[in-house]
Amino acid sequence: MNNVFLYLALAAYFGATGLWLAYFLAQRERYYRYGAWVMTGGLAAQTVALLQRAWIDGYLPAATFGEALLLLAWALVAAFLVLNWRYPIKVLGALVAPLAALMVSGTLILPQRHGTLSPALQGFWLAIHICLTLLGVAALALAGLGGILYLIQERQIKGKQFGFFYRRLPSLSQLDTLSYWCLTVGFPLLTGGMIFGSLYAQHTMGRFFSWDPKEILTLIAWLIYAVLLHERLTMGWRGRRAALLAICGLLVLVLTFAGANLWFSGYHSFSRFILQP
Amino acid sequence: MNLLLFGVNHQTASVALREKLARLIPDLGAAYEQLGTWPEITECLLYATCNRVELICVTDDADCAAARVREFFGRHPEITPADLDEAFYLRRDRDAVQHLFRVSSSLDSMVVGEPQILGQVKQAYREAAEHRATGPILNRLVHRAFSVAKRVRSETGIGDHAVSVSYAAVSMAKKIFGELTGKNVLLLGAGEMAELALEHLKGQGAAKITVANRTLERGVKLAQRFRGDAVSLEEVPDQLLVADILISSTGAGDVLITRDQVKAVMRRRKQRPLFLIDIAVPRDLDPGINDLDNVYLFNIDDLKEVVEQGWERRRVEAGKAERLVAAETLKFLRWLETLEVYPTIIAMKDKAESICQAELKKTLNQLGPLTPEQRQALEVLTTSITQKLLHDPIIFLKRNRRPKYPQQELDLVRRLFNLDPDRNGDPPDPE
């Protein structure tokens, strides 16, 4: 998977990181604009790399932790750029770009796949399951990052600290709206991904739900987001509590994605996907 | 050619003197007419704000023009020569350019970074142009001043930081609500500071304004000014349901709104954020209110802190702006210097042209009848020889923009080509 386009994407993400950090520090509009172009270029390069790989293999490359990380990085950048176009919160880029850069670096460092993918995992519907879930996770991750920024800014305002962060971060209402918007997009995507996954499991293995650690953790995250969305809609929850819950959800998702593969094992772990040659 | 700037500002002159001077200005027509009668002053621009009265002019005879400008201001019966000596400053050339740039960038203002001054200079320039008082040099200078001011505003944060309590309140409201359009404002008590804040909020698009005051009459009066409603203090708890921003400045002496009251209201408001400003001493609002979620309480000390920081930030940004102004001043002076070489270039070209014509005439007379083609060939020959000969000196004058001794070099060129035949050809004895 280590082809030239991937390295191009990596360079672009690091470049955008530099530009957006510079924007955050110096507050020059110019840096932000350049960063957005570089980031878009990086996404295009990564898309080419992924398509190339999928074309050669004939299925979506998501069988190792590294491959899944790469797909998640793609989803995160894509979700951020869409968000940026609809609802620009410029400082968020200074969090997303380094994250994407680290994820792509992780892919390049992590061991590559040896062996072939089991045929049960090559189906089209499985690809849908993966795409929807990862896009949902990406959008919800943005909601969580927005929540972090919200908590920082709220702390400045409540603590009467009108300094560095207070000046640079956007208003509380913008950050809250950002988090809410990402939630309303991410939650249906995650739900869809889970439904497709469970249908596929019924189709291939004969059960909807296998009490696998990854499935359980995802369900917990889903419940957190369901509560958050419900409370936001009915009780007018917002601000600090909503931000905290969005961050909780993000932590569970991180645990699901990384932890379930590294520490717990189940049929959903990447190590089970590969048939040893 | 010189630039002169003569005037007073808030640092050198008292309000009384500035008022007297400002009274001279309303009749701009007469002022420009009088300035126009003096041949020493080729271009001029007069501007007056509440903090300054200044006149900038272009002249070929600086000393004479300075005397004329003094005469112009001294004409006012209430202004004594002592006033002129004490309060007026005279800036020349580089300092005049820099001063105008600083004024229009709001670096010389009483409140550094205030945005009005640029508009006032623009207006004054428009009037001067109407009276045909400005010319190519001032036109260019004033336009440079506008673009410098624009750069200062966009490249430094000189206007970004709140430096008044009422504006600090608005800037904080923006950090909570983002946009203030459609937000409802509730005023408790009708103090002066609250009124100022209200003006700013209204300017930012605040929707409904409600005034609650102990004496309803005064509340009604204030409410009418902002097209709002007046209510009694007893209605405040209900008003809290619809308000987004509350400014409290009663002199009540005891707590008007308690933490529990706000807590109960927040549930009914479905947690819509509430921004409370308490500028009363002693405080009207329970300080514990700030601990509630989605409620932000600020008191007068918090606001003052913001203002302090705003001043501090503006001072830092003003430093950056000064550097920018200094660089732009140099650029303008360089342009001015190139302007000084043009008469010499033109004189050189004229001289060459007249020599060409004279020699051509002589030669044509000697050669006798020629075909038009031959005649034309001769003309082309002479002009191209002189053009090629002059090319290097002209380039030298134009490109050598920052010579060590600009005036001496220009003089040398003029003497070399004998452009001033009536002047003594020998250089003045150095001793």
Image (tube, rainbow, N blue to C red):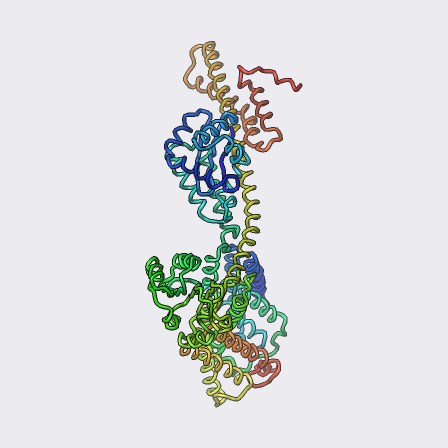
Residue lying at the far right of the rendered structure:
B431
Q: Is B385 rendered above or below residue B173? A: above
Image quadrant occupied by the C terminus of chain B: top right
* Residue A75 seen in the current view: no
Residue drawn at x 60%, y 79% is A115
Nearer-the-camera pick, A28 or B195: B195
Compared to residue A130, the image places residue A39 above or below, namely: above
Give residue A264's quadrant in the image.
Answer: bottom right
Q: Residue furthest bottom?
A: A206
Tell me residue B61's x, y (percent). Answer: 51, 25
- Please tell me which residue lies in front, B166 or A35: B166
Residue A134 in the image, given as x and y percentages of width and height: 50, 75
Q: Left or right of A102: which side holds A88?
A: left
Name above or below for residue A218 compared with residue A55.
Answer: below
Whether residue B256 is visible, yes or no, is yes
Count of labels shown? 0
| Front residue of this view, candidates A146 and A238 | A238
List x then y, in percent, for residue B83.
50, 33
Check the image and report above or below for B204 versus B386. below
Residue A15 relative to residue B244: left or right: right
Q: Position of residue A229 (x, y in %)?
A: 44, 78
